[in-house]
Amino acid sequence: MLVVLAYALLLYTSLAAPAYARAHQYLGPAMLSEYAAPWPVALACALAVAGIALAIIPVRRGEHWAMWTSLSLFIIPFIARIATDPRCLRVLDPHQHGCHTFMIAVALGIVGLVLAR
């Protein structure tokens, strides 16, 4: 269930990105176009829904292919976000705004997959 919670958190952050971008105008149009535009939101939602489907059925059965696929659904957006969003590199500083929710979701998902093994 920890993995499902992590994917739900990724789904929430993806769906909330447009509202977050409108509420924080100081981040500029770059943030809106990179993370809150329809295409990135739809792609992240599709990955989260696929991850939830994997976690509910084959990961619970202990199927190894599903665990590796689910892990890749966490790692691919993680690598892309780290490479493109400099705020993610400040995630360990609690006084800086960054992509805390995204990083928490990825960490929670990986821990959930390890525990599901």
Image (cartoon, helix red, strand yellow):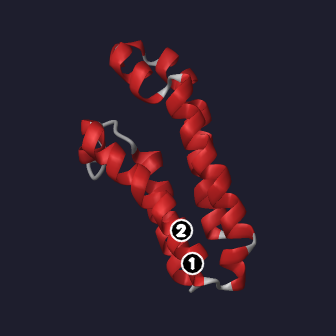
| Residue at the image position 61 percent from the left and 42 percent from the top | 45
**Residue type, mark 1 in image:** Trp
| Residue at the image position 56 percent from the left and 24 percent from the top | 38
Q: Within the image, what quadrant is residue 11 found in? A: top right
Going by the picture, which residue comes out furthest to the front? 65
**Residue type, mark 2 in image:** Thr
Q: Is residue 21 above or below residue 35?
A: above
Q: Which residue is mark 1?
A: 65
Which x, y percent locates residue 48? 61, 51
Is label 2 in a helix, a strand or a loop?
A: helix
Is label 1 in a helix, a strand or a loop?
A: helix
Q: Quadrant of the C terminus?
A: bottom right
Total number of numbered discs in the rendering:
2
In the foreground, 36 or 9 = 36
Which x, y percent locates residue 111? 49, 73
Which x, y percent locates residue 35? 44, 30
Going by the picture, which residue comes out furthest to the right? 57
Q: Are marks 1 and 2 in contact (CB under 8 Å)?
A: yes
| Residue at the image position 62 percent from the left and 69 percent from the top | 2
Q: Which residue is mark 2?
A: 69
Q: Label 1 to label 2, Cα distance in Å?
A: 6 Å
In the foreground, 83 or 93 = 83
The numbered disc on residue 111 is none
